[in-house]
Amino acid sequence: MQRVKNLGYDEDELYDNHDEYEQEDATAYTAEDKENFATLTPVIRAELDEAGVQVSDKDIEDALWHYYWDVGKSVSYLKNSRTPRLQQQSTEKSDKAKAKSKFDEAAERSAEKAVRTTMPPMFAADWFRNVSWTLVPSHVEGDLIPNEPVRPMPKLLGGSSKLAKLAEERRKKAATAAASQSESPAPNGSLSALERLSKPRDAKENEAPGPKVEPKKYPIRKKRDPTPPPREPTPPPPEPEEEKPDLRASPTAFGLALSTSPPCGLHPASMTLKDLLGSEVADDPFQGPSPDDTVLRAQQYSKGTPNKRRQSGVNGLAKKTEALKLNGTAASAPAQPKVRSRGLDVPKLWAEEKSRRKASAAFVVIGHVDHGKSTLMGRLLLDTGAVAQRDVDKYQKQATEMGKSSFALAWVMDTGTEERERGVTVDIAQHHFSTNSVDFTILDAPGHRDFVPNMIGGASMADMAVLVVDANQLESGMKGQTREHVLLAKAVGLKRIVVAVNKLDSTTPDAWSRSQFDGVKGEVLKFLRESGFAEQFVTVVPCSGLSGDNVAKAPKVSGPAAWVANTHPTLLKALEKSVIPDIDGATIRRPLRLQIADVFRGGVTNPVSVSGRISAGNAQTGDSVVVQPSGETATIKALEVNAEPCDYAFAGQICTLHLTDIDPIHLRTGDVVCAASHPVPVVKTFTAKIEALKSLLPQAMDVHLGRLHVAGGIKQLVSTVDSEGEVLKKKPRIVKAGQKAIVKVGVEDGVVVEVGDRVVLRAEGATVGFGVVDGTA
Amino acid sequence: MRLIRQNIERKTGAGSATLLPEEPEDMWHAYNLIRPTDLLRASAIRKVVTESGSGSRSNERVHMTLTIRVTKLDFDPQAAQLHVSGRVAVENKHVKLGSFHTLDLELQRNFTLEKAEGWDSVALDTLKEAINQDAKAQLWAVVMQEGLANICLITDHQTILRQRVEVNLPKKRAGSTDHDKSLQRFYQTTFDSLLRQLDLANPKPLLLASPGFTAGSFHQFIKTQASNGGNKQIQQLVPKITVAHSASGHLHSLAEVLASPAVTSKLSDTKFARETQLMDRFFELIRKDDARAWYGPKECELAVERGAVGKGGGVLLISNSLFRSQNIQTRKRWVRLVDEVKEGGGEVRVFSSMHESGKRLEGLGGIATILTWPIEDLDEEVDGVQEGQDMPDEDGVDGGVDGIEGVSGHDEDIDFL
């Protein structure tokens, strides 16, 4: 019932419109309407100003009219229709500004004068000066009197029968008024043609023909919309004044513009281009914020984020691209965000911030199995506040349940289920903590001989070493991994070492025996000296990880450990003292190199993440990188240093890179992430200058290059050399323990090696040699 | 391999032998027996194109027995297939003399081999070894570490890598179970691949070796699978598993594993154990800088020339890859060397280049000796000889390498380097 009724009504509309066109021009807003405009326009303007949107009165009136005085809807419509356009314009403009080369600027400057002088104010007549139809003889010329703006057809989103009804009422009123109106459009042929152009062919009220209409922007209300399909073949209503259906084409923009002129533009010559082109162009170009303002505002917005200082160091170009990026993302939020480089000059930033930056250091904790490395580190983290007492209490409870209560502190580091069950560290654990002066990264190495490969990987990421020695069991360590770890620490190039003589609380016969400490200290120092550690880089500290004495806090003055406080610094102090920044600007300027220590899923947003130490160069968000040996490219989506997101990282830092555009199957532990412009070559053989710990023959071995652990071996003994590098013997039959030699090392799969990399050779579970890569061929 | 018939003359070595390969490993023996320029007669299928009088052509696949003069051998250890290329030496109605053919030797099909320059001592030894019908020891081994597992089949003469499982394991990190999860997935993948390789109906001993706890955990994993699955065959496998320690998960760690008593007791065959023992002895001597141990082609030749590899402990260790050289002269040279040592009363051990100890020997150039008495500075003498006259060694050694290069495409995973 309802349907049919509405249908009929709409058909009415279809035809009604045509006979009203003649009168429509004459139709003015009624007094009542005008009053409404007068009251509501300021309200809307205020709202829009608040939102920073510039709209002409006319537009506001239009909106009000079409939304039937609904202020809220009008405002939102105007905002929607205005905002993106403005931004787009500003974007385009700054784009243009960016693209301007010096050449262009010069050309512009030279052209400027001419332009300035020849450019008259843009009048419509001038605009069409040379067009033939402007040269009409005066006697034929008709007078164009654009008395009333032809309103574009109503622009409602969905149809609303109520609104439509009101509109009809209005039109009827106008029709009655039209009889008295003497003013009708001039019967000039050309004009009527124009008029006709301006008329929409389809008179359906709901469909807006104007170029401004962006139907997508409005919420769809079609569901309640009773408007039937207009082409329904219902019999025409039996009205006498019925006219033929309109067959005219819809108006072109040009035609519309010609017939649409504001009431003020009575004189044709005073019509500006803007009038011609309608409201596509903003009424007042200077009303809105200038493109520069937009850029500035965007920058201010971005400066709200923590990197305030950095912005100052960036050149103008980078600023503009950044502003662009911000605008772009705001305008098209759902679009795929392509990570773009900010073009930061990282070496410069590094140099600028050098003095302000807190020192940072990574240390590897080495020593024989069960000498208390993990427990000592757990204590250090607890006492520096990096780990909450609550967590340790929880571990304590769980460990007691398993009958291993003394392992509670070690559980801070040993998070693996297997590690906890067996009470042995298997893999490197990485943790951060900060003191007032230094940011530390702990790399807790496993002590068991089977996991020495992991220890080598951890040591290769460290700046210095902490050697943990059990005061009661020095001998077992010196035969075992205390010795091997110290040699490996030297092999990977560590120079500074802090010796923590641990478990002094359980020395026999009495705790904190000073003589025992001195004995251990003497032996360790002797061994370190023999291994080639310079004495000034070695510090020996007595401590107890389990009780926590002299780790972060000095022991009590009254207890048996009182002597320690006066003679030795705490472990933490000793660590702080050993930190020497040794990264120079040249290293940071080199192309990026980062050996992957771990490939993992960093979370839902970062499905592919790798971590490792940047050995050279720098990285920043948006950099494109190559992962060797697979040769796959990737883009750095985000960076983290010490679990804090940041924009860039540089050599010496242990960082996490979140990558995109790469499949994780191409990433392996030990692969190298390098700058896309300077990929490291992949080789299968290389020569190395080796120091032998056991006799070496051409034989199969495990080859360790930092985190990389591959099968390979010595292919050829090239020569033995003395400490100065002089060749002693060519093609030796064997390289004996303690000798230095140049050997050719082969690996089964291609590896990424550069001259100067540290290499460790192991066979049958023992380190047999270590050295430096000499040449890659 | 079964010897069907042979008519080899003792003195000249002329004559032929007809052999029947019965199991995959026999292909390896065949590969070591057949040399370029030998005459090989075996059944073949050849596409024959016949043209009728009217000019129409018809293709036909014809079964026939072909005799070819061998030019090239191609051995695929993983599939245990041997392809022998050569030129047809005996004409028949389908195939012209001199046309090319590649014979694919097949199990349970006879082939007849005639040596071009007669059966030498090495060839006869190889033949003897090949037709040895003693029970063959076979063993499956999984050498693993976290994220890497090498599944291989160990036979008397070969170590064949059948499958390598490589998984990237995320490292442990607080609050994440990714490591444990992917470790389980790694075990599952390894287990699945292992089951595909094993013949469960007739389970062979299975050796699991790794550093740390990986092998133990994997053993536990298999046990759990066996008890859960209700698969009888897997349950039968469980008691055949041995867990051992290895220094790493790489294949070359297998040598160390196989030398361990836990494993030698399980291997019925003693050949491998003897070889390993000899290699260990050699390495020990050379570490002690004992002048009785030397390696390298020139050094060994010189030592043999001096009669230092003789009665009372002189041993020549030689890889069979040297006899596979394309170059006849080179082959003859090594055979001569072997004969010389034998005449002098020394011991000769031909190592399989596809076995672990053989690979260790390959690293040393494929040949090494333990002398009866020490010779100091043998290498310097060799250098002197080299300066004086350019010995034809270089291409000889290269030739030896060429012999294996033909297969390097297949067994590069196994061969060290």
Image (cartoon, helix red, strand yellow):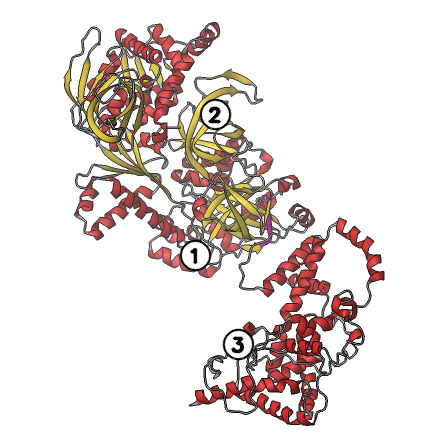
Percent x, y of residue B240: 20, 39
Residue A78 visible (yes or no): yes
Magenta stretch holds residue B99: no
Dot in front, 2 or 1: 2
Residue A553 visible (yes or no): no
Q: Earlier in the sequence, mark 3 or mark 2?
A: 3
Query: Which residue is situated farthest in the left direction here?
Result: B4
Task: Identify the mark at residue A219; answer none if there is no mark.
Answer: 3
Percent x, y of residue B147: 38, 43
Residue type indicated by callout 3:
Pro
Q: Secondary structure at mark 1?
A: loop
Quarter holding the N terminus of chain A is: bottom left
Task: Identify the mark at residue B104; answer none if there is no mark.
Answer: none
Q: Secondary structure at mark 2?
A: strand
Chain where mark 1 sits: B
Task: Identify the mark at residue B175; answer none if there is no mark.
Answer: 1
The span from disc 3 to disc 1 (Cα, nearest Å) is 45 Å
Circles 2 and 1, Cβ within 8 Å, touching? The answer is: no
Dot in front, 3 or 1: 3
Task: Identify the mark at residue A744; answer none if there is no mark.
Answer: 2
Q: Residue at x 27, y 42 (%)?
A: B194
What range of the chain is rendered magenta? Answer: A646-651
Percent x, y of residue A754: 54, 33
Chain where mark 2 sits: A
Residue type indicated by callout 1:
Gly
Q: Nearer the viewer, residue A531 or B346?
A: B346
